Image: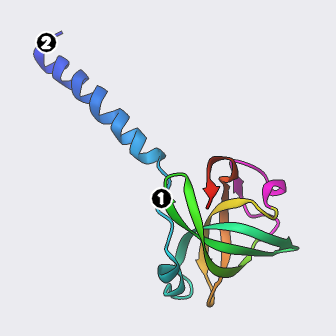
C-alpha cells in the first residue's frame, strides 16, 4: 500500500464510524414553547406519554428531555390524531397504550393538537421522572 492509500484508510476508519454514530442519535424533541408556537401545517417532533387511545384519538402528556434517556412531564395535555394505518416503529400498534412513551413525528393542526405521521415506541429505553 502506498502512503495515499494508508491515509485514505485511516480517514475512512475515523470519519465513517463517527458519521454513523451521529445518525443513530434521535432528533431533539421540541420543547413545550416550540410546540405551542408552531404554525398549523408545520412538522413537529415531540415525545409523549400516552394517557389513552380511543379509536383514532390519542391523548398524551407532552414530555421534555432531561438527558438521553430521561424525560419529565410538562403538564401539557395533547390530542393527537392517530389513524389505524399510522406507521409504528420499534414496536407495533399494540404497544401504543396508556403509559407508553412515544417519539412522535406529526403535523401541527391547532393548539395542542397534531396529526401523527409516524410513532416510535421508546418505552423500554427511557424513564419518565
Asked if 90 appears above or below 57 in the picture, the reply is above
Q: Is 55 within the magenta?
A: no
Residues 40 and 68: in front is 68
All told, the count of numbered labels is 2
| Residue 25, x across and y down, in percent | 47, 49
In the image, is residue 89 part of the stretch drawn in magenta? yes
Q: Quadrant of the N terminus?
A: top left
Q: Is residue 63 left or right of residue 68?
A: right
Tag 2: Cα neighbours inside 10 Å, few (<14), some, or many (≥20)? few
Q: According to the image, label 1 marks what residue?
A: 27
Q: Residue at x 23, y 23 (%)?
A: 10
Q: Which residue is mark 2?
A: 2
Establish if 91 lies above or below 71. Answer: above
Residue at horizontal 87 percent and vertical 74 percent from the top = 54
Q: Position of residue 114 (x, y in %)?
A: 65, 80
Mark 1 element type: loop
Q: Position of residue 45 (x, y in %)?
A: 54, 68
Q: Residue furthest front?
A: 129
Q: Specify the segment rendered in magenta.
A: 83-96
Q: Is residue 25 above or below residue 65?
A: above
The residue tagged with tag 2: helix, strand or loop? loop
Residue 56 vertical placement versus 49 (above, below):
below
Q: Residue at x 81, y 57 (%)?
A: 93
Amino acid at each position: 500500500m502506498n502512503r495515499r492509500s494508508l491515509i485514505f484508510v485511516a480517514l475512512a476508519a475515523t470519519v465513517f464510524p463517527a458519521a454513523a454514530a451521529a445518525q443513530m442519535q434521535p432528533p431533539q424533541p421540541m420543547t413545550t414553547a416550540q410546540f405551542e408556537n408552531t404554525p398549523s401545517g408545520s412538522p413537529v417532533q415531540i415525545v409523549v406519554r400516552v394517557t389513552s387511545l380511543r379509536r383514532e384519538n390519542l391523548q398524551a402528556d407532552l414530555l421534555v428531555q432531561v438527558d438521553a434517556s430521561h424525560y419529565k412531564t410538562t403538564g401539557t395535555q395533547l390530542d393527537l390524531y392517530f389513524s389505524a394505518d399510522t406507521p409504528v416503529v420499534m414496536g407495533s400498534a399494540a404497544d401504543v397504550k396508556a403509559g407508553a412513551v412515544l417519539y412522535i413525528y406529526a403535523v401541527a393542526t391547532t393548539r395542542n393538537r397534531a396529526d401523527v405521521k409516524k410513532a416510535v415506541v421508546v418505552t423500554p429505553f427511557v424513564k419518565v421522572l
